[in-house]
Amino acid sequence: MIVVIQEGFKKGVSITWKLAKILIPIYIFVTFLQHTPIIEIIAGHFEPILYYIGLPGKAALVLVLGNLSNLYAAIGVIPALGFTIKEITILSLMLSFSHSLIVESAIAKRMGGSLLKLNLLRIGMAIISALIINLLW
Amino acid sequence: MQIFDTNISIILGEGLIGSLTTVFKMAYIIIPLMIVLEFAKHYNLIDKITSFFAPVLRKIGLSFNATFPLLIGVVLGLTYGSGVMIDSVDKGEINKREVTLLLIFLVTCHAIIEDSFVLWSIGSNFFILFFGRLIGAILITVIFSKIIKEDQIEEICQIKPREIDN
């Protein structure tokens, strides 16, 4: 019983540590970016597209990071950029369907899947779910 | 030259406090959650839940043998799920159609408890997140289970030996 608790605790601490190593540098980096005009410029480019799924332009940063890097990198950026609850929920749902595409493709490949189709499926699910939440909320 | 609109040490402080607060908020959730999941693994709870979910999953085209890797993947994560799945494939317990359906389900919906709690800790709506993802994955698997007939499996899932044949 105690061994199980210890084991779970160790795992929890190790996950938190792994997460902190990614999250803290990215959070600080994005905080610096926020004090420059760069984010505004990036956001301006994506604003017209992301408008349809209920997200502001700066969400592009989170989506790109989450899909190419991993979920925890995206999680590091979300609090730093300051979104509303609706925006965070839409972003979270999109990210939970489609994240860490590169790493997880390697796992899917090992199971014998078609990477192009599976990744298109994930991205498609992310976009459709965001459209639905944006319409209903 | 002025790149930033305020003093660098102020920005650094802002970043440090913000990131550490986020990490601690997540630690509060992740550590207890991992203890609970460890209990589930230790007492083979997923094994027991499997027989409960098997009849439901048969409706979306997955047999009893495919239910276990599915639940492992959904609860513990893609790496665990794929490990169990590859094991089941090697033993010949699940067929190619089920592998495809499993892949479709797991690739969209894995480690759902951990992900949902972590995203909830940064302010997302837990119920929308958890049930949205689950229902989405179930729907897409049902759609594919209707589309994929036994002879069309190669369309989505190319099993290794077949690649060699071609």
Image (spheres, helix red, strand yellow):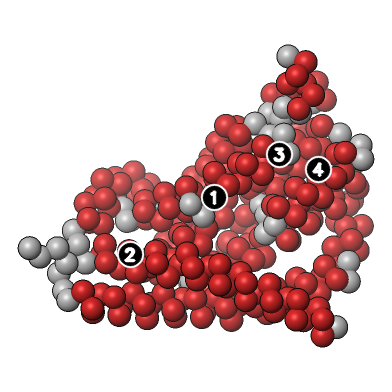
Separation (CA) of disc 4 from disc 1: 21 Å
Respond whether the residues carrying marks 2 and 3 are from the same subunit.
Answer: yes
Q: Identify residue for label 2.
A: A29
Image height check: is A5 above or below B159?
below
Residue B73 shows up from this direction: no
Image depth: mark 1 or mark 3 in front = 3
- Residue B48, image x, y percentages: 91, 63
Same chain under badges 2 and 1? The reply is: yes
Q: Where residue A38 sits: x, y (%)?
A: 22, 55
- Would you name the residue on which mark 3 appears? A110
- Name the residue beneath numbered marker 4: B86
**What's the chain of the residue with tag 3?**
A
- Pointers 3 and 4 in contact (C-beta within 8 Å): yes
The foreground one among B115 and A2 is: A2
At 89% from the left edge and 51% from the top edge, which residue is drawn? B55
Q: CA distance from mark 2 to mark 3?
A: 34 Å
Q: How many marks?
A: 4
Residue A125 point in image, percent of width and height? 56, 44
Q: Kindly identify the amino acid type of the residue bearing the numbered disc 3.
A: Arg
Q: Are marks 2 and 4 in contact (CB under 8 Å)?
A: no
